[in-house]
Image (spheres, coloured by chain):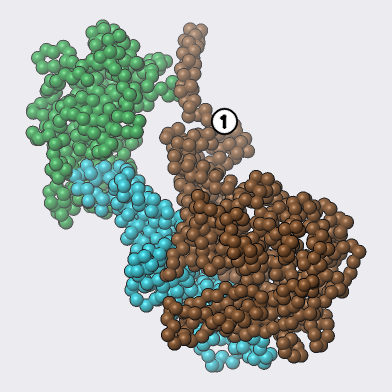
Chain colours: A brown, B green, C cyan
Amino acid sequence: MLGLGRRASSHFAKDEAKLAALLSDAKRFKGESLWQDAWRRLKRNRGAFLSLLFLIFFMGLSLIAPVLPVPSPMALDLVAEPQPPNWPWEANPRLAENLDPARKAKRFGLYSTEAKGAFADNGWQHRSFIDLVRPMAPGETEDTLQPAAEVSAFVQEISGRKPIVYVKPGEEPGTVLERHAVVYQSSDRSRIRYVKGEQQIPVRLTQMLTSAGTTAIYAEWLLPGEPPLTEAVEELGYTNEGVVGVTLPEDPTELTGTVENDRLHLASRLDGKLERRFSIALKGADTFTLEGARVAWGDEWPTDDEAWRNLLEPPAEPESAMDVESGTEPGDEPEDPTAAEPEEPTLEEFLALARLWTGEGGSLQLVKNGKRSVAFSERTATAQEFLPEPGLGLRAKAEEALEAGGLVATLASVDHIEGTWDLNWFDRQLVKGRAALFGSWQTGPLLGTDGKGRDLLSRIVWGSRISIQASLIATLFSLIIGVTYGAFSGLMGGRIDNLMMRIVDVLYAVPFIFVVIFLLTMLSEMGVDRMKVFYVVIGAIYWLTMARVVRGQVLSLKNQEFVESAKVLGASTSRILFVHLVPNVLSIVIVYMTLTIPQIMLFEAFLSFLGLGVEAPQVSWGLLATDGTEAISAIKVFWWVVLFPALAMGATLLSLSILGDGLRDALDPKLRGKD
Amino acid sequence: METQPTQAAPAVHAGGPAVLEVNHLGIRFDTHQGSVRAVRDVSFKLAAGETLGIVGESGSGKSVTSLGIMGLIPQPPGVIESGEVLFDEQDLLKLKPRQMRKIRGGQVSMIFQDPMTSLNPLLTVGRQLTEVLAIHEGLRGRKARARCAAGLGEVGLPNPEARLDSYPHELSGGMRQRVMIAMGLICNPKVLIADEPTTALDVTIQAQILELMQKLQREHGTAILLITHDLGVVAGMSDRIQVMYAGRVVEKAPVVELFGEPLHPYTRGLLTSVPTLTGSPDERLTAIDGQPPDLADLPPGCSFAERCAFVRDNCRVSSPPLDAIRGEGEATRFSACFEVDRLDAHGAARDLSFLPAAQTPAGHVPTLNTERDIQPSEDDA
Amino acid sequence: MLPFLFRRLRWFAITLFCVVTISFFLMRQVPGGPFDSERSLAPEIEANIKAKYNLDWPQWKQYLQYVGPINLDDDGLFGDRSGKPLGGILTGDLGPSFKYRDYTVRGVLSESLPISIALGSVAMFFALTLGLSAGVFSALRRGSGFDLIARVGATIGIALPNFVIAGFLIIVFSFQLEALPVAGWGSANKLVLPALALGAPFAAYIARLTRTGMLEVLSQDHIRTARAKGLPEWLVLTRHAIKGGILPVVSYLGPATAGILTGSLVIEKLFAIPGTGMHFIESALNRDYTMAMGVTILYTVLVYSLNTMVDLAYTLLDPRIKLEEA
């Protein structure tokens, strides 16, 4: 017995040494976790690694978009055609020293490069125009079309602006289509909205019949001042839609609209998308006075007038003769004038921002509480002096301006425009950073501009924010549903599993995109936010595959020998779950996720193309790609409008799919330890 | 690399002129990690009706040798560096692809290791069999079908006619390997290369398959090149054995002599790593320490030097040639070792009881899986 | 095979029932009916219109009428059993279009569906020929210049939305080369660009699938066996490799058809092709619910039956798959 024991122990001694050697041999495979191993292998895969770097870079760029010295993605420079890329070595046309003197003079005019509106300007949407279809004049050919000067003159007369004229052959052979367009900028918008004290401004309303058979209504009035400022004209909208009822006494004040509480309400739809409502107080049967006409974007008539008035009016004048609409809830808005001080930092940031994007003396629009905007603009030769300095309060500046020029500077409240950039704290810090780093300097149109003069580079970078955000959220959504469903089904097994998978099969057979479009149109008709519908619906489609994949993985893992052996070794259930099952499922989930994101981005583009995705003034890659296809014309190929968004999108999706493939290889346990 | 012209070894049983003669075959693969010299200077002859076993662990170059003979080395990355493969007085390596195709599958055919994957899962067995006949004998239609059915019957498949319409997944592993054998033999080849024909099969099926191969060999007089890492299989099947290590032939001998008195440290290592029926159950098997060398980065001298108990300084400098040993008359034993004599003196007589005295079916031999045993594994610990 | 088809049919019925029911009732929940955006109508006229489309009935009754084949009228469930022939989607009657006043949905679809199918099949044909040949060729010439180009092209094709591809195609073929018309329908050359643009992403994906599939098959043991039999290389390829190599493509055909049908929404809009997709988008935007539902139902049927056919084809190609398990 003893001898045998010794023999055995000597064997063991030998074995121990051997075991140590074996273990050290195996260390390079087994010493690292699945993730370390995968990371090492991913780094070796050059394509996937470069893709990862690119994606990190690009996502970083989109994250810090506000700090980049690019123009506003929505700032308009109304030119008829897209402008080609401005190479870095060329003079930057956006900088004051390179401005064309003629344009420089017209600082606030149509061709102004500076008054591009505010951070959230979506000025192009309040473009008004007259379309004129006329027979081709004798001797006129398609190449020598001449717009009708008298129409232009008329438009200029009534609007006080020089219209942009587009001429092209009409759809009917032998006809000519002319468009005489006037663009209103935020300064105009704010002008009509301001009412100081009890002052009433006489308004003349003009009707104009457009070629489309709709009636455009213009409000025209005189701003008092010394000397009187130019007359201003605001298009009030079309009358052919949604307005029922009242006929007013006599021309030119004959109008249709709804009368409610002694007020005339006009509503119109622009571009088929935007609801604009105007309210005009009826102060008598024979004359109209414009009093606090408001622009309301969205469905609701502004109800919390109290808040913005408190902000603007000195506290000494608590109530004015201005309209008091229904539903004012003073308790809701804490911003009484004394409490305006805490606003200072916010205002300061926005002022800084406005300077950056409008140059000196432009106008700015402030988004407050995600709901209200305050616009500030100057229209005098002394505009420079009233420049809002960063760090000074808006109100102080406004009062200063008012004292100096009477009604020269105007303050008004504009309702929050739906989809306006609503800066959060993080982005505000970035804007501060931008002001600190670059001052008012900004890049030229490095990648060119699109048809509305918006900077493409800026749009691509800002657009990536929505596209990436949308795809990430939607992927996450599909992930949560899919993993839960699949894991549950796989773990339950048996009859439940069978039924759950049958349901998935049924859903698979539904041509989902049709249902999605159906749902999107119906739900947005019901007033649900489209992006929310998008996330939910996308999640609802893409969870199917996820559920299948996870279920398959769970099923196969459940019965695998290493799980058995872990059980035999006495591992607890939670240990088996988290040490053995979760990593294995997780790897497949990660791979699938990287492959889902591109699909969702494509889907977003698809919906945007069909007009069901993100809405202007927001911008996403899908919209950019759509803009690109619209910029294709037989006359001139604006290649940059097509190419650059496509490049950005293509490169990102490409990297995602390469990374996905790389991850699949890296996380494949069968390939572990191999290269 | 120094080479020694190999002496013709007469077949022990069948005798007669060699049908297949391989001389100084060298094959390398150019990979990203460098050139992998998978086969170096391999020579042998194979006579009609004879069985030559090639033994070695994985990566020793035995399969590459067989693929080289068949002209199935994918090029690139494979490169035939040197040598010739003589069959019917023509060098197979120099043949045009068209001529090579005539021989491949017809006169020289091959059976692969894994019958599960070696048959096309999407085609019926009949289709896969008849296409061999169509190519090599121009036989089509009903005649070809009849031949194939006969072939399947010959390898012992029940109900061969019906089996022709089966898909591979409908057959068991053993049946599939029988189909593979039938496919290899259907054109009555002169040489059959069997690359690990039984590795993927159950032990009982292995025995049946080996028996079947021997039976068919007797009937057709086919020369068989049997490639395996299973010492039991070669012991039962082969007339002569050739041991390969790291791409080289290290020892070559008639089967009984090799097992009785291995004359290369590697062969000896292989044999001591195999359990025997008569050995004491307490006795531990010895494994060969270390790992085979990296073929992409071969050290100078003998490839086995690092793992060899008999190593001398000389071994690390120059590579021992494959020399004939004890040449009474024509040499039958070759060993590539400088220290043969020392080894000889050291060598304890090996218990040969497990060897078949005559042609015992190999199935009665305990399965000796060198591949498992020579790899250091946790079983040893 | 028959039990398989029966089972499929059963699930199909369930699927269709869900689609029809859910969308029918959702549709009725939307504020603002299909006629709301029009000039305000006299109440009598509005009532007349509603009566014409049975919108004044309770919803369950409208639903029954829509599904059919039950003849309902104002008097009750089965009315006076006289007059109109039985309708409802079960008889193939998809109801009247709310927007195109004088058309039934079925009429509009029967005009536009052939167009969409023509476009879709040309696109599919193109995707298959280009995808398969590029995939096979690049697998055979792995690592060559062609392989590289094909792989890059395929990845780009997958990564770009098809309307962007269409944009590039228009720039090159219509404006630079002036070889093909920009848009429209009616002649063969007008079909080329839309079909190319529609098929391109699928060609790319098929090429990728084929390449991977072929590489995998070519590395399998049975290919070595086929070579060892002495088969010439082209026979190895055609008889042994391709069939296995394109199996993944076959199983992709189901999603691909669905994808092509979907993609045609965009392509039809872009190229102004009067196909079903265009009608669908228009109807969805114009609240023409019967039309939108009609298209959805039609496409559900199409996708489902095509999927079933693909599954059948797969079982024919791969003997290892049994229909009973599918």
- Residue B370 at least partly seen: no
x, y (%) of residue A203? 76, 80
**Quadrant of res C82:** bottom right
* Residue at the right extreme, as displayed: A316
Q: At 61% across and 36% down in the image, what residue appears?
A: A575
Q: Nearer the viewer, residue C103 or B8?
A: C103
Q: Nearer the viewer, residue B35 or B243?
A: B35
Q: Nearer the viewer, residue A95 or A629?
A: A95
Q: At 16% across and 51% down in the image, what residue appears?
A: B134
| Left or right of residue A430, residue A45 in this image | left
**Quadrant of res C80:** bottom right
x, y (%) of residue B285? 38, 17
Query: Where B320 falls versus A453 (above or below)?
Result: above
- Label 1 SS: loop
- Residue A220 at least partly seen: yes
Q: How many marks?
A: 1
- Amino acid, disc 1: Leu
Query: Where A503 falls versus B317 (above or below)?
Result: below
| Left or right of residue A462, residue B332 in this image | left
| Left or right of residue C36, residue C270 in this image | left
Query: Where A134 falls versus B34 (above or below)?
Result: below
Q: Residues within 10 Å of mark 1 (few under 14, many from 20)?
A: few
Q: Nearer the viewer, residue A395 or C109?
A: A395
- For label 1, the residue is A569
x, y (%) of residue A321? 87, 74
Q: At 31% across and 56% down in the image, what residue appears?
A: C133
| Left or right of residue B320, residue A643 in this image | right
- Give the letter of the chain under mark 1: A
> Split into 4 quadrants, where in the image is the C terminus of chain A?
top left
Q: At 69% across and 75% down in the image, what residue appears?
A: A234
